[in-house]
Amino acid sequence: MILKGTPQQTRRRFLKSSALAASAMALPSLPLASQSMQADAHIEILPGDPIGTISPEIYSHFIEHLGGVIYDGVWVGENSKIPNEGGIRKSFIDTMRAVKAPVLRWPGGCFADSYDWRDGLGAASKRPARAAFWDQQDSNRYGLHEFMRTCRLIGCKPYLAANIRTQPARDFYEEIEYCNAPAGDLSSHSAAPAMPNAGAAQRAANGDKQPFDVSLWGVGNESWGCGGNMTPEEYAAAFRRYTAWTPSYSDTPLRFVAVGPNGDDVNWTERLFKALYANPERRKLWGLSIHYYTSGSAAKFAAGDALQFSNDEYYDLLTRGSLMDKVINDHWLAMGSTPGQPNVKLVVDEWGAWYGKGTELGSNYNLSQQSTMRDALLTGITFDIFQRNAEKVGVAAVAQSINCIHSLMLAQGDKFTVTPTFHVFQMYLPHRGATSVRTEFTASSIDNPLGNTPIQVGGNSYIGQIAPVRTLSGLSGSASVPAGQPKQLTLSVVNPHLDQPKTTEIRVRGASVASATGTVLASHDVHDHNDFVNPGAVRPAKAVTGAASGGRWMHTFPPASVTTLLLTLS
Ligand code: AHR
């Protein structure tokens, strides 16, 4: 099935194009293959076996002061000719709205632990330019108020990463105060007069009278590495100190996220929890951060290339990406092995495919990379893993939304395109807030010939290594029942086979499928991608339903595809 219109273009032949996603969202219609042929794969959905509610926040986002993410990607400035709303690139806002971005994490990443949040306040002309983590000088033009404006325009919640490496705990709680204290006089004590809170007054003077109401706070970032090279015990002590007292302005407790492991380093989590829970006064942990990036083998070129890859490297990357399931479950078990801890959620706040250098937008766009159909499949595989682990994963944020590792958007000046990954974010919208239900997939698996080779991530080896894995599921996915609609099911399926369509019998235990509609993202070449010349090269097709057969649904999933089916039960 060929869904793209023109041959692959080189990404360097740019064309003026900021026409976002409007075209990408007007889906062409293609027939769903619905045949009465022999099945070579089977899916059984068990609506009576719920896993948990799929948190809408697992489809969240991350932007960092890194390369061209903030400056150019998000922030173009009020006086720019590039369409913007208050300095923020309009096509960025529109795309984030189109995927109903629930949460946006900022300012890092590694950047966060060198950042002074006060530097980005007040008159732009008076803000200090400073050396920043990613070897770039930061003008501080984009600061806290600009970030909050971005969130308001998108309609998403802010998630702030606090600096615990170079700032004391006082700066942390004053940042919370600045963000959340209500304006106006607060009565403090019956014996003392009511008076304005200093943080709130400063915030109002800087243009925002209303509190930002930030509830999600990362207490540091990668504290085992760029965030301070700490041991788990040292980090546990820091976490306790930073969260022992923080100002509170609502009955809903703040959600503090502790720094989790380097990749699949279970030892970090076990030691961290032991140290944290050794002190019975520690009560404020809501989530444990997980960073898991996927890279190719080091066989040819460390981390692999975003655009040039062999069939073996394609299967290898998807196999390594599907290890997200192991990372989630290993750390869930590790947290559970500590007695007395409350129900801490996993917060996978950095994930994606991270390749080596070679496809950057330009020299100032550190870590930007192209994104192909392969990355769309990785996105589907990852979302399905989150959804199958709905009771464990509370928040997840892709790294990063624009001009970076696993981006939904690429932008350079007035040029703009969405990537295939953007389309998968849209295709998974119906799963939000639904009940994930157990689903069994039966299909021939795929051998990963590179399963034994070592990996590096982004050319760095500091992210935790994972034991090699040799097998990739021949068909994977997840299913959910939308809230209050027991006769509906959403099924998403990834067929990673490069050359095999999978004709699949879909059954629902205890019910019959009456009809289905669907959307499919596929392309005749997994190297296909969108660029500034051809921003609509890869886009999904709207499927037309076929007929049910004896309460079952026969569907052919095209090679190298992501499909979402909306099933109606009789
Ligand atoms: O997303 C890029 C970087 O990857 C982040 O700054 C850091 O947290 C991780 O190592």
Image (cartoon, rainbow, N blue to C red):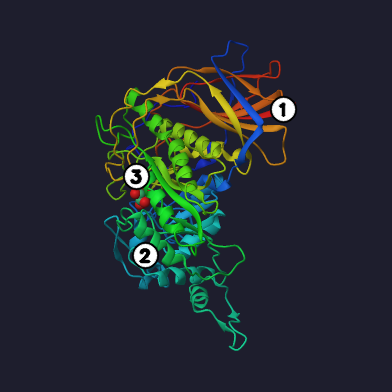
Note whether ligand 1 is within 8 Å of mark 1: no
- Report the Cα–Cα distance between label 1 and label 2: 54 Å
Label 1 environment density (alpha carbons within 10 Å; few <14, some 14–19, many ≥20): some
Residue 7: x and y in percent read 40, 26
| 54 left or right, relative to 70 | right
In the rendered structure, the answer to whether residue 441 lies left or right of residue 446 reads right
The yes-or-no answer for disc 2 within 8 Å of ligand 1 is no
Indicate the position of residue 384 as horizontal and vertical percent values: 52, 35
Q: Residue furthest left?
A: 300
Image point (69%, 33%), residue name: 488
How many C-alpha atoms fall within 10 Å of the one at disc 3: few (<14), some, or many (≥20)? many
Q: Are marks 1 and 3 in contact (CB under 8 Å)?
A: no
Q: Residues within 10 Å of mark 2 (few under 14, many from 20)?
A: many
Residue bearing the label numbered 1: 569
Q: Which residue is mark 2?
A: 140
Of callouts 1 and 2, the N-terminal one: 2
Which residue is tagged 3? Answer: 368
